[in-house]
Amino acid sequence: MLRRPLLTHVSTGFAEVIACLVIIGSACGGTQPPIPAPRTVPITLPSKGWSANYTAIASAISTITASDLRAHVEELASDAYEGRGTLTPGGDKAANYLAEQFKAYGLSPIPGQTSFKVPYTLSQFSYSPTENVIEVVRGNTRTSLELGKDFSPFVFSNSGQLKETAVVFAGYGISAPDLGWDDYSELNVKGKLVLVLRHWPNEKNKESKFADTRHGLFTTKARVAQQHGAVGMLLVTDPRHHQATEDDFSDTGFIRLPLTDEEKKQSAEEQATRAKQASTSKFYAAHISQATAELLIATRRRNKKRNKNNGPDLAAIQAGLDSGTLTVKNIRLRSKASIQISAARTSAPVHPDNVIAYIKGSDPTLSQELVVIGGHYDHLGVAPTGSGDRIYNGADDNASGTSGVLELAQAFASLAVPPRRSLVFVGFSGEEKGLLGSMALLKEKQLKEEQIAFMLNLDMIGRNPNKPVEIVGDAYATTIKDAIDAANKDVGLKLDFKGTDYSGNSDHHSFFRRDIPMMFFFTGTHKDYHQLSDHSDKLAFDRMEKIVRVSYGVLNRIANADHAPSFIHRVPWLGVRIEVLKTTISGPTIEAATIVEVEDNSRAMKAGVKAGDVIVSIGGKPLTQARTIGKRFRELKPGVQVELTLERGGHQSLSISVVRAKKGFIGIYPRELTDEERTRSGLAAGQGLGIRGFPRDSAAEKAGMEEDDFIIELAGHTVGMGNLGASLARIGAGEKVLVKIIRKGRRMSLSIVLGERK
């Protein structure tokens, strides 16, 4: 699973693509274990909602077993696959494994392809070692740093040079007086470089006020440093909770999808704007190794507790900051640094593989529609340095979901008569690099998005067996929740439907962005997430079997239904829910963007919009394709008035004027309430959120809210951690609303004017 928000620089992993691909069973790649044969075990079938061929379905489901899931996971998460990094021999080996399984089950490549492995194109960018140089100056000693070993530039850094600039230690680089922390309060960093720690104070404390803020982001630390007059930032991974081996400087570059002509134009405009801004205030930024940071602090003098390097090491300094026994003013450096940074340049394109298999549907018409089942097979590869275990095996992330995709492929392939719609099984690469494989699948039209009826994503389905399985996407597609409930009736999984609490940190998001109905099974993160310790012996395979069997039931229903799910478009600022439905407008029956729900007291209701109205024009431009309604709304700029033309009852035409709201800003650092707090306060599951603190210029604090208050209602709508963002988007900046809170057990109401997020 992709980590969000991204807290790593864009220098992501590349290994040299070897000429000899690893072929299963060949002298080049070694041998593979035998492909698991179908297993049959007794099962109980649901009583309703399935096709009449109960015997065939029972046989298909029986092939989904915990033992087969374990076999796939143990293979893919073994050291032989070297962490399955994209564009590495281990990643190629994993792709070959998936292809061999699909072939053995009797599936076919997708139409138009002769191989299960379907390459896509990425642009690779790299930094020149002669044009990107850092030199540490300590008195008469000069130490040149090696690009790819000691440092890597941040992609947001300007290009240019700094000559022997003083370095100032600025702690975590956080300026948040409202949270009781300001590293810059007693520092003069104007015209200097700042050395800052990654993350935030007492990172492992779950109650930390910084945990859910943007203060840990690289870009935030850089912006704050520049606001205080610094000309550059050297960031080091903090050693108190993180080993030096977590830093990977070995691949000095990054990969991304090639830009379209439109994207190139937009990128050129953005670069011109940045260049204009940089002409007056350039800022240089790089991620440096812990060893380099130790060089920079070795000459500090202002501390009585000195070691052989004339001062405490970086870990001791961090511990002092976290405990409050040390402040940044105690750390006086006598180091300088020279920096030369040049922008990354494109090199030859590279071509990782998605692995795609196909089962043609049995219905002559519906077989043109595709039901996609996917999971990413890539992971983080091998740590560049260190001793002992250096392989990120990625058993849960995402050998678990990949094994589920394979088991579903085997189950459906065992049917003598396949479902009515065609099935496409995909192992995505590049997910850990930014959902690259799934985005390329659609951008390069490996599958035509207009044919995709539904997408199911399996990512990290192997852990936390005592917690409910999270279901993402149920509020964004019709019939999905009913299909899941029916499929789960006799399996009995505990499910947590996330509703509008949407998380886009895996491959389903590529489909969601294109308004394709989708859903995502997820069992949650854990302490082994993205760690070397994510091993197969920690997975709950019996529960995985249940998840995959429920997935089969959902897919069976959708693939055989008369009508595929419809994407639900939610427009919070307008206060409407829109579906593309068959309707008649002054003539033949067509697909139309139909408003199916209007929220009370919303902009739509105040403008006279009613459920059943059909949107035919936005901003004077006809809506010629109803399925583009989501894209058209997303193109509207906040704060700009727009005309909507509606058809009512198939004959009445009317126009309304609305202004897209700027997203409201309440100004709190929220936290999830515990079950005990909700029970004590009489709140339902998911209702309410706590306040841990307030950022600067907080609307909530101005309204009289206090730390430890519980917010339970905003503008007449129940709120929790899952829907706060949507609620703020619905209300908009500058609006005065009523907020209901609980303070020390007492319920009360306050009036608040929402701010605007900067």
Image (cartoon, grey):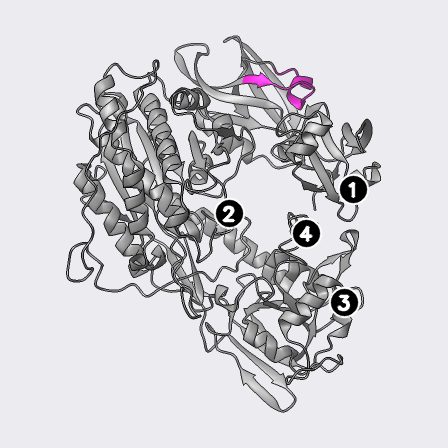
Mark closer to the chain start, 2 or 1: 2
Q: Which mark lies nearer to you, 4 or 3?
A: 3
Label 3: how many Cα within 10 Å (few below 14, some 14–19, many 20+): few
Q: Is residue 243 visible?
A: yes
What amino acid type should be assigned to the residue bearing mark 2?
His
Q: Which label belongs to residue 325?
A: 3
Mark closer to the chain start, 3 or 2: 3
Residue 467 vs 570, above or below: the answer is below
From the image, tell me which residue sits under label 2.
Answer: 526
Separation (CA) of disc 4 from disc 2: 20 Å
Mark closer to the chain start, 1 or 4: 4
Q: Are marks 4 and 3 in contact (CB under 8 Å)?
A: no
Separation (CA) of disc 1 from disc 4: 14 Å
The residue located at (40%, 64%) in the rendering is 389
Q: Report x, y in % for residue 109.
A: 21, 40
Relative to 637, 123 lies left or right: left
Q: Which residues are magenta?
A: 596-609
Mark closer to the chain start, 4 or 3: 4
The answer to if 308 sits in the magenta stretch is: no
Relative to 144, 260 lies left or right: left
From the image, tell me which residue sits under label 1.
Answer: 707
Mark 4 falls on what kind of element? loop
Q: Are marks 4 and 2 in contact (CB under 8 Å)?
A: no
Q: Report x, y in % for residue 123.
A: 38, 57
What amino acid type should be assigned to the residue bearing mark 4?
Phe
Relative to 723, 614 lies left or right: left
Q: Which mark lies nearer to you, 2 or 1?
A: 2
The residue located at (20%, 53%) in the rendering is 32
From the image, tell me which residue sits under label 4.
Answer: 210
Label 1: how many Cα within 10 Å (few below 14, some 14–19, many 20+): some
Separation (CA) of disc 1 from disc 3: 25 Å
Mark closer to the chain start, 4 or 2: 4
